Amino acid sequence: MSRTVVAGYDGSAESRAAAEWGAREARLLGAELRLVSVREPVPLSYAALAEGRRDETDQVARAAVDGLRLRHPAVDVSLVRLSGRPGELLAAAVDDAGLLVLGSRGLSGFGGFLVGSVGQAVVARTRRPVVLVRAGEQAADEHAHDPSGIPSAAAPYRPVVLGLDTEGPDTALLTFAFEAAARRDTALRVLHSWPLPPYFAYGLPEDPELDARLAVDDAAALSEILGPWRRKFPSVVVREESRPGKPAAHLTEASKDASLVVVGRRVRSSPIGGRIGPVTHAVLHHSAAPVAVVPHD
């Protein structure tokens, strides 16, 4: 991975959370952090007003950089200002970097977050991993509780959760997840879901013997895929979980005790643009932890 983490920044609470998460990740990677601030074009009649707002935005961005440098002295923080369409420019800004971090609004009353149109466009377009972070995300949220029962950044990291498709396991996705767990010195919890037998849909009697056989076969397939990766990353404790049902539901539940959820996005050439995929889309909207979307062929 390139030693640069890019974070989209517009002064909002979401982008501040993304910048802080990006700084923490840059420290783990030994990388630099590049804040990218994008100004959208305005009609000429609004140019004077827009110029005043630009000056204010620049001041806020510079203050953010100064604050990040104070809070994360080990990280080299820089600021890049661009003008144009945010979705296009943010996707392009990460071409020479290893990771893009974006903020998303939290869903009031729910554990997940709302991915706006810019975030969805960037996730669907870029060939680099993108991490979505909720507004209000704190460093302590990624860690287990301390002995007093309070989340603390001094406590060990919560596990990294990986959603894996055993029919098409991708090297880039597995590498990202194992490296993320290794950096955090935490466990990697790998979840795979297999479809329920047809009788569930038609209200037919259950077949416990068939259920058991399907479960054993699926668990064996998952173990076979992960075997070489266990040997490649011997320091990472791997927890394999093969479950029947909907993968998005299992990943959402697992996110409640995760430092990071890792999912894939298959890159497809399409005349109507990129797609995120139904499982990844659902996880993005309902995860209680930051979500890394890793594009792969």
Image (cartoon, rainbow, N blue to C red):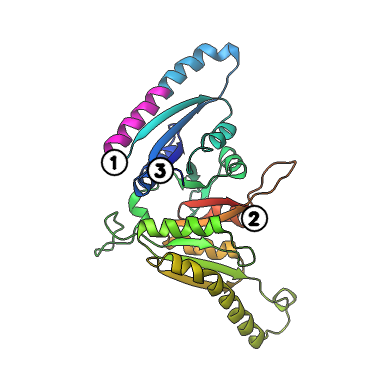
Q: Do the residues labelled 3 and 1 touch (CB within 8 Å)?
A: no
Disc 3 vs disc 1: which is toward the camera? 1
Instruction: Identify the mark at residue 74; answer none if there is no mark.
Output: 1
**Where residue 34 appears, x then y in whole percent?**
42, 35
Which amino acid type is marked by label 1?
Ala
Which residues are the magenta region?
58-72
First in sequence: mark 3 vs mark 1: 3
- Report the Cα–Cα distance between label 3 and label 1: 13 Å
Task: Give the Cα distance between marks 2 and 1.
Answer: 38 Å
Compared to residue 96, the image places residue 238 above or below, namely: below
Mark linked to residue 144:
none
Image spot of residue 121 (x, y percent): 61, 40
Q: Mark 2 points at which residue?
A: 278
Mark 2 is on which residue type?
Pro
Disc 3 target residue: 22
Is 105 covered by the magenta stretch? Answer: no
What x and y, as percent, mark residue 69?
Answer: 30, 35
- In magenta stretch: residue 65: yes
Secondary structure found at label 3: helix
Kindly state the secondary structure of the residue where label 1 is placed: loop
